[in-house]
Structures are given as C-alpha cells and as structure tokens.
Amino acid sequence: MSSETAAPTSVSTHILDTSVGRPADGVALTLSVRSGSGAAWSAHGASATDADGRCKDLPALPDGTTHVRLDFAVEEYFLSEKHRSPDRNRPDQQAEEQQDAPRVRDSGVFFPEVAITFAVKPGEHYHVPLLLNPFGYSVYRGS
C-alpha cells in the first residue's frame, strides 16, 4: 500500500471524571508528535473535551510519527464547578466521608496536568481514554 492510499494514523481521547461519575467537559489538551525516541517533540494540534468528555477533532498524524504525547490541562477543570458533583453542594445529600480519607487536604490541585506518551504505528487509530480523579488517573488504549 503506498503512502498516498494508506489510512492516516489518528488519535482520539475522552476523559471520565471518576470522582463524580461524569465526563470531564472543557479540558484543554495539546497533541505533540515526534519521529524516533531521541527526536524533539513538535506541537501538532490542540483542542478541548466536549460536553461528553470527548475530543474527536485532533488532526491526523504526520508520516513518520513514532510517538505521540497528549498533554491534558486538568487544573482549571478541577478548580471549576464542572468538577463538583451536584449532590456535593447540597448539605442534605452530602455523602459520608471516606473513613481513611485525610481530614485536611492541601488546597492546591495535586495533578495540574497529565501527560500521556505512547508509541504508534502507521495507519492505525489510537483511542486513549483518561480516567481521572483529583488524586490519581489511569489510561488505556481503547477502541
């Protein structure tokens, strides 16, 4: 298959805020690429998650891309009202605090950004979901 007819290599992502059980809306992210482990990163695209927590409008990757980095700017999201569960704001529906949770937490955001780096092969699609909460995150290759 020639490079003119080969399927483009592409990336999509979504974020689920597991602490509130909802998609993370409005999280800015950037897409960077490089060709080879020692090569410099090059910015290739930027977007933000939609109301469903998805980002489907990232550009196809340039030929020769071997590694991709997604940088999620999660600090603004965690500081916004979007992160707060509606039930947490109502005193009559406050959930019991977790028994082993620290009583005092620092007021800052623990993970102000999340950077995910992964290898790619030509012609494949990579869907990389981010499962996010204020004190941890997980990613995987989705479909």
Image: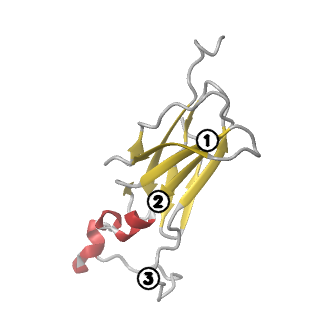
Q: Is residue 36 above or below residue 5?
A: below
Q: CA distance from mark 3 to mark 1?
A: 34 Å
x, y (%) of residue 26?
35, 54
> Do the numbered discs 2 and 3 sit on residues whose CB atoms are within 8 Å?
no
x, y (%) of residue 3?
63, 16
> Do the numbered discs 1 and 2 sit on residues whose CB atoms are within 8 Å?
no
In front: label 2 or label 3 = 2
x, y (%) of residue 90?
23, 76
The quarter holding residue 83 reads bottom left
Three-letter amino acid code at disc 1? Val
Dot 2 lies on which element? strand
Residue in view at x 52 percent, y 73 percent? 110
The quarter holding residue 136 reads bottom right
Task: Give the residue pinned by disc 1.
Answer: 33
Name the side, left or right, on which 45 lies relative to 40: left
- Mark 3, Cα crowd under 10 Å, few <14 / some 14-19 / many 20+, is few
Residue 64's tag is none
Q: Is residue 11 above or below residue 117?
A: above
Residue in view at x 50 percent, y 67 percent? 112
Task: Give the residue pinned by disc 2.
Answer: 73
Three-letter amino acid code at disc 2? Ala
**Which quadrant would the N terminus be assigned to in this image?**
top right
**Which quadrant would the C terminus be assigned to in this image?**
top right
Dot 3 lies on which element? loop
Q: CA distance from mark 1 to mark 2?
A: 17 Å
Residue 107's tag is 3
Three-letter amino acid code at disc 3? Ser
